[in-house]
Image (cartoon, rainbow, N blue to C red):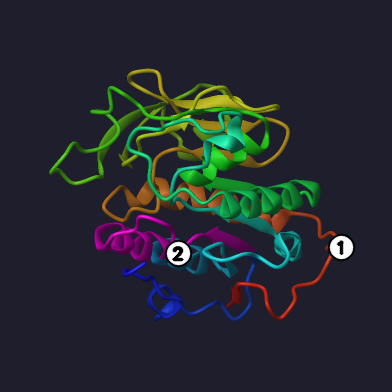
Amino acid sequence: MSVVVRLEEVLAGIEPPDDPVARVAVLVSLNFPDMDEAVAALVRRFTRVTLATLTALGASFELFDTSGPLADPAAVQRCDGLLLLGGGDIDPACYGAPGLDVPNSYGTDRRADHDAMAAIDAAESGGLPVLGICRGSQLINVHRGGTIVPDITDYALHRGGPGEPMFLDEEIGIVGETRLLSILGVDRVIARSGHHQAVAVLGAGLVLAARARDGVIEGFEDPSRWTIGVQWHPEDDDGPTRDRMRLFRSFVEACAAREPTTPTRGVGEDDRVLST
């Protein structure tokens, strides 16, 4: 892999609050197969915006980098919430389609998928609020037994075409009487999107919360707990700050309000975790 995203690049200049209101486990693969410099730049920027937004809202974080194996994914339980960021495609074997030839596939890493879903399992078992973005939302859905659209054939609403920027503005409708609607305060947003996959069948306990103009699922939630997945990228600072701050603020508030639980295990020194 010739292109590498380094921890110091995403952490530079980000100062944790002196008295954090909550501690958030942020899970991301800073590096994954097929990464080029354009994608690496997005990973750096989106991760930095995420961490900066959390600290601006008074939260500290632990960064779980699934570029390599996590010694103990259950270590997320020592935090107050789990935030899963975007990245490469999920291996089709994880959603019941082993060996599927996926057009436009990139970044597949089954080991990273399994580590991420183990972290989701631990977070849900520990009662943590969970927020998933793009790949992160798809991982939540697959963990719940849902499936994925392997490649959106008519992609014009969701990403740029050949020779065009990957990310574009997408109009997304927010479903009525959902937590997501109450958070964002509007029934329609213009969001930043750049995806060729999406949630197909929703997993157990999840309900539709947002959809694109063509009907593609753009958001879901669990009505029984604070679990939300969005297919778009609120952490893209080319998009609206207001929507990002409202979504992240609600997540941080849910983390701060969570009743503490006892972690199943501690974090070993060899975990790929950085705390701040």
Q: Nearer the viewer, mark 2 or mark 1?
A: 2
Which labelled disc corresponds to residue 61? none
Query: Which image quadrant is residue 265 in?
Result: bottom right
Residue 178: give x, y in percent of width and height.
57, 27
Residue kind at label 2, given as amino acid type: Leu
- Disc 2 designates what residue? 30
User: What residue sits 75% from the left and 54% below the top?
Assistant: 258
- Is residue 141 at all visible to an observer of this figure? no
Query: Which image quadrant is residue 33 in?
Result: bottom left
| Quarter of the picture holding the N terminus | bottom left
* Residue furthest left as drawn: 163
Residue kind at label 1, given as amino acid type: Thr
User: What residue sits 64% from the left and 41% below the top?
Assistant: 227
**Quick one: 96 or 204, which is closer to the camera?**
96
User: Dot 1: few (<14), some (14–19), or many (≥20) neighbours within 10 Å?
Assistant: few
Q: Measure the C-alpha gap from mark 2 to mark 1.
A: 29 Å
Q: Is residue 164 above or below residue 141?
A: below
- Disc 1 designates what residue? 262
User: What residue sits 18% from the left and 36% below the top?
Assistant: 161
Residue 240: give x, y in percent of width and height.
31, 47
**Quick one: 5 or 124, which is closer to the camera?**
5
Residue 135: give x, y in percent of width and height.
48, 44
153 sits left or right of 218 in the view = left
| Quarter of the picture holding the C terminus | bottom right
- Is residue 95 at all visible to an observer of this figure? yes
29 sits left or right of 127 in the view = left
Secondary structure under tag 1 reads loop
Query: Which image quadrant is residue 166 in?
Result: top left
Q: From which residue to which does the magenta span run?
A: 24-47
